[in-house]
Amino acid sequence: DQQVKQNSPSLSVQEGRISILNCDYTNSMFDYFLWYKKYPAEGPTFLISISSIKDKNEDGRFTVFLNKSAKHLSLHIVPSQPGDSAVYFCAASANAGGTSYGKLTFGQGTILTVHP
Amino acid sequence: DADVTQTPRNRITKTGKRIMLECSQTKGHDRMYWYRQDPGLGLRLIYYSFDVKDINKGEISDGYSVSRQAQAKFSLSLESAIPNQTALYFCATSDSDITGELFFGEGSRLTVL
Protein backbone atom coordinates (compact mmCIF):
# COMPACT_ATOMS: atom_id res chain seq x y z
CA ASP A 1 0.00 0.00 0.00
CA GLN A 2 1.79 3.08 -1.29
CA GLN A 3 0.77 5.92 1.03
CA VAL A 4 2.74 8.52 -0.91
CA LYS A 5 2.56 8.37 -4.70
CA GLN A 6 4.36 10.19 -7.44
CA ASN A 7 2.51 9.06 -10.52
CA SER A 8 4.85 10.60 -13.07
CA PRO A 9 8.09 8.60 -13.32
CA SER A 10 9.69 11.30 -15.43
CA LEU A 11 9.30 14.90 -16.57
CA SER A 12 11.14 16.75 -19.31
CA VAL A 13 11.24 20.56 -19.36
CA GLN A 14 13.00 23.25 -21.35
CA GLU A 15 15.44 25.51 -19.54
CA GLY A 16 13.73 28.66 -18.27
CA ARG A 17 10.29 27.08 -18.15
CA ILE A 18 8.36 25.94 -15.10
CA SER A 19 8.72 22.40 -13.75
CA ILE A 20 5.77 21.03 -11.80
CA LEU A 21 6.23 17.81 -9.87
CA ASN A 22 3.20 16.23 -8.26
CA CYS A 23 2.65 14.03 -5.25
CA ASP A 24 -0.48 12.45 -3.75
CA TYR A 25 -0.92 10.89 -0.32
CA THR A 26 -3.57 8.76 1.29
CA ASN A 27 -2.78 8.89 5.02
CA SER A 28 -4.74 11.74 6.64
CA MET A 29 -2.39 11.61 9.65
CA PHE A 30 0.48 13.06 7.60
CA ASP A 31 1.10 16.61 8.75
CA TYR A 32 4.53 17.47 7.41
CA PHE A 33 5.76 17.14 3.87
CA LEU A 34 9.19 17.40 2.35
CA TRP A 35 10.84 17.32 -1.04
CA TYR A 36 14.27 15.81 -1.57
CA LYS A 37 16.51 15.97 -4.60
CA LYS A 38 18.89 13.19 -5.57
CA TYR A 39 21.75 13.25 -8.04
CA PRO A 40 23.32 9.99 -9.30
CA ALA A 41 25.80 8.40 -6.87
CA GLU A 42 24.79 10.80 -4.11
CA GLY A 43 22.37 10.63 -1.22
CA PRO A 44 19.11 12.59 -1.27
CA THR A 45 19.38 16.19 -0.10
CA PHE A 46 16.62 18.19 1.52
CA LEU A 47 15.04 20.80 -0.73
CA ILE A 48 11.95 22.32 0.85
CA SER A 49 9.20 21.40 3.30
CA ILE A 50 5.73 22.43 4.31
CA SER A 51 3.63 21.96 7.40
CA SER A 52 -0.03 21.04 7.11
CA ILE A 53 -0.98 24.36 8.70
CA LYS A 54 0.22 26.11 5.55
CA ASP A 55 -0.78 25.82 1.91
CA LYS A 56 2.33 27.32 0.37
CA ASN A 57 6.02 27.62 1.13
CA GLU A 58 8.55 29.39 -1.03
CA ASP A 59 12.34 29.26 -1.14
CA GLY A 60 13.92 31.05 -4.06
CA ARG A 61 13.02 29.26 -7.28
CA PHE A 62 11.24 26.47 -5.40
CA THR A 63 7.65 26.62 -4.17
CA VAL A 64 5.67 23.82 -2.59
CA PHE A 65 1.88 23.90 -2.60
CA LEU A 66 -0.27 21.76 -0.33
CA ASN A 67 -3.95 20.98 -0.95
CA LYS A 68 -5.07 19.06 2.13
CA SER A 69 -8.60 18.43 0.95
CA ALA A 70 -7.26 16.75 -2.18
CA LYS A 71 -4.32 15.18 -0.31
CA HIS A 72 -2.05 16.57 -2.98
CA LEU A 73 1.16 18.54 -3.01
CA SER A 74 3.23 19.92 -5.81
CA LEU A 75 6.70 21.36 -6.25
CA HIS A 76 7.15 24.23 -8.69
CA ILE A 77 10.58 25.16 -9.99
CA VAL A 78 10.74 28.50 -11.78
CA PRO A 79 12.78 29.04 -13.84
CA SER A 80 14.09 25.53 -14.40
CA GLN A 81 17.84 25.14 -14.93
CA PRO A 82 19.86 22.22 -16.34
CA GLY A 83 21.42 21.75 -12.89
CA ASP A 84 17.95 20.93 -11.56
CA SER A 85 18.04 17.65 -13.49
CA ALA A 86 17.77 14.99 -10.78
CA VAL A 87 15.36 12.57 -9.14
CA TYR A 88 12.86 14.32 -6.88
CA PHE A 89 11.24 12.50 -3.99
CA CYS A 90 8.31 13.74 -1.97
CA ALA A 91 8.05 12.48 1.58
CA ALA A 92 5.60 12.76 4.43
CA SER A 93 5.56 12.23 8.17
CA ALA A 94 2.93 12.06 10.90
CA ASN A 95 4.37 13.99 13.81
CA ALA A 96 1.64 13.87 16.44
CA GLY A 97 3.34 13.37 19.77
CA GLY A 98 6.68 14.46 18.38
CA THR A 99 8.05 10.97 17.98
CA SER A 100 7.89 10.59 14.25
CA TYR A 101 10.49 13.06 13.10
CA GLY A 102 12.63 11.39 10.49
CA LYS A 103 10.25 8.49 10.01
CA LEU A 104 9.46 9.54 6.51
CA THR A 105 7.27 7.80 3.96
CA PHE A 106 8.65 8.45 0.49
CA GLY A 107 7.11 8.49 -2.93
CA GLN A 108 8.65 6.56 -5.82
CA GLY A 109 10.46 9.57 -7.23
CA THR A 110 10.20 11.59 -10.45
CA ILE A 111 13.16 11.99 -12.79
CA LEU A 112 13.34 15.62 -13.91
CA THR A 113 15.35 16.45 -17.01
CA VAL A 114 15.86 20.10 -17.88
CA HIS A 115 17.07 20.61 -21.44
CA PRO A 116 19.28 23.58 -22.33
CA ASP B 1 34.75 14.97 4.20
CA ALA B 2 31.12 13.91 4.19
CA ASP B 3 29.09 14.49 7.34
CA VAL B 4 27.47 11.06 6.99
CA THR B 5 29.83 8.35 5.79
CA GLN B 6 28.80 4.89 4.66
CA THR B 7 31.06 1.90 4.10
CA PRO B 8 31.32 0.00 1.88
CA ARG B 9 30.00 2.05 -1.04
CA ASN B 10 29.60 -1.05 -3.19
CA ARG B 11 29.48 -4.71 -2.24
CA ILE B 12 28.73 -7.90 -4.15
CA THR B 13 28.06 -10.98 -2.07
CA LYS B 14 26.46 -14.39 -2.30
CA THR B 15 23.24 -15.76 -0.91
CA GLY B 16 23.59 -16.82 2.71
CA LYS B 17 26.54 -14.60 3.56
CA ARG B 18 26.52 -12.19 6.50
CA ILE B 19 26.96 -8.58 5.51
CA MET B 20 27.45 -5.45 7.59
CA LEU B 21 26.97 -1.92 6.33
CA GLU B 22 28.46 0.77 8.51
CA CYS B 23 27.51 4.39 9.01
CA SER B 24 29.28 7.12 10.91
CA GLN B 25 28.35 10.77 11.28
CA THR B 26 30.04 13.94 12.39
CA LYS B 27 26.88 16.07 12.61
CA GLY B 28 26.36 15.38 16.31
CA HIS B 29 22.79 14.25 15.71
CA ASP B 30 21.08 11.85 18.10
CA ARG B 31 18.79 10.24 15.54
CA MET B 32 20.00 7.82 12.91
CA TYR B 33 18.15 5.82 10.28
CA TRP B 34 18.63 3.12 7.68
CA TYR B 35 16.58 3.36 4.49
CA ARG B 36 16.51 1.14 1.44
CA GLN B 37 15.86 2.36 -2.11
CA ASP B 38 14.40 0.10 -4.77
CA PRO B 39 13.40 1.15 -8.29
CA GLY B 40 9.74 2.13 -8.41
CA LEU B 41 9.36 1.99 -4.63
CA GLY B 42 11.19 5.05 -3.36
CA LEU B 43 12.95 4.84 0.00
CA ARG B 44 11.64 2.62 2.76
CA LEU B 45 12.60 2.75 6.43
CA ILE B 46 14.36 -0.35 7.80
CA TYR B 47 15.41 0.67 11.34
CA TYR B 48 15.85 3.84 13.30
CA SER B 49 17.47 4.90 16.55
CA PHE B 50 16.70 8.03 18.55
CA ASP B 51 19.67 7.55 20.86
CA VAL B 52 22.24 4.90 21.76
CA LYS B 53 19.82 2.94 23.95
CA ASP B 54 16.84 3.24 21.62
CA ILE B 55 16.39 0.99 18.57
CA ASN B 56 13.15 0.69 16.63
CA LYS B 57 11.91 -1.33 13.69
CA GLY B 58 10.81 0.47 10.60
CA GLU B 59 8.55 -0.54 7.76
CA ILE B 60 10.70 -3.41 6.42
CA SER B 61 12.91 -4.75 9.23
CA ASP B 62 12.57 -8.48 8.51
CA GLY B 63 15.93 -10.00 7.59
CA TYR B 64 17.88 -7.08 9.02
CA SER B 65 19.39 -6.15 12.38
CA VAL B 66 21.14 -3.03 13.62
CA SER B 67 23.60 -1.94 16.24
CA ARG B 68 24.08 1.56 17.62
CA GLN B 69 27.65 1.38 18.89
CA ALA B 70 27.90 5.06 19.79
CA GLN B 71 26.07 8.29 19.10
CA ALA B 72 28.01 8.62 15.86
CA LYS B 73 27.83 5.02 14.62
CA PHE B 74 24.92 2.92 13.40
CA SER B 75 25.46 -0.33 11.52
CA LEU B 76 23.05 -2.48 9.53
CA SER B 77 23.51 -6.25 9.28
CA LEU B 78 22.06 -8.83 6.96
CA GLU B 79 22.53 -12.09 8.83
CA SER B 80 21.94 -14.29 5.80
CA ALA B 81 21.70 -12.25 2.63
CA ILE B 82 19.14 -13.13 -0.05
CA PRO B 83 18.84 -11.81 -3.62
CA ASN B 84 15.78 -9.63 -2.91
CA GLN B 85 17.93 -7.63 -0.50
CA THR B 86 19.80 -6.32 -3.52
CA ALA B 87 19.23 -2.58 -3.23
CA LEU B 88 20.75 0.82 -2.52
CA TYR B 89 20.99 1.43 1.21
CA PHE B 90 21.09 4.86 2.79
CA CYS B 91 22.01 5.90 6.28
CA ALA B 92 20.58 9.20 7.50
CA THR B 93 20.67 11.41 10.57
CA SER B 94 18.40 14.07 11.96
CA ASP B 95 18.41 16.69 14.65
CA SER B 96 15.51 16.06 17.00
CA ASP B 97 14.75 19.80 16.97
CA ILE B 98 14.19 19.95 13.24
CA THR B 99 11.02 18.32 11.98
CA GLY B 100 11.68 15.57 9.51
CA GLU B 101 14.75 16.90 7.74
CA LEU B 102 17.15 14.03 7.16
CA PHE B 103 20.80 14.22 6.18
CA PHE B 104 21.75 11.25 4.03
CA GLY B 105 24.98 9.46 3.34
CA GLU B 106 26.03 8.71 -0.23
CA GLY B 107 24.59 5.21 -0.18
CA SER B 108 25.83 1.62 -0.18
CA ARG B 109 24.96 -0.44 -3.22
CA LEU B 110 24.54 -4.09 -2.27
CA THR B 111 24.18 -6.91 -4.77
CA VAL B 112 23.30 -10.38 -3.53
CA LEU B 113 23.89 -13.13 -6.09
Image (cartoon, helix red, strand yellow):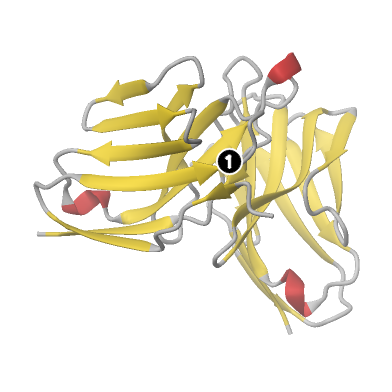
- Residue A66: give x, y in percent of width and height: 41, 29
Residue at screen point 47% across, 53% down: A6
Q: Is residue B50 above or below residue B86?
A: above
| Quarter where residue A40 is shown | bottom left
Residue at the spot of label 1: B4
Is B54 situated above or below A112?
Answer: above
Q: Position of residue B4 (x, y in %)?
A: 58, 41
Say which residue appears at 17% left-offset and 44% top-offset: A18
In the rendered view, does A74 fall on the left or right side of B93?
A: left
**Quick one: B112 or B19, which is closer to the camera?**
B112
Left or right placement of residue B78 versus residue A26 in this view: right
Judge left or right: residue A52 versus residue A93.
left
Give the left or right position of residue B51, taking residue A28 as reference: right
Q: Residue at x 65, y 67 (%)?
A: B87
> Which is nearer the eye, A17 or A27?
A27
**Kind of residue at disc 1:** Val
Secondary element at image label 1:
strand
Residue A85 picture location, percent across and down: 27, 55
Q: Chain of mark 1?
A: B
Which image quadrant: the C terminus of chain B?
bottom right
On the image, the x and y values in percent for residue A97 come to 75, 15
Quarter-of-image position of residue B13: bottom right
What crowding class fits label 1: few (fewer than 14 Cα within 10 Å), some (14-19), or many (20 or more)?
many
Q: How many marks?
A: 1
Quadrant in the picture for residue A13: bottom left
Q: At 75% across and 70% down in the image, what residue appears?
A: B85
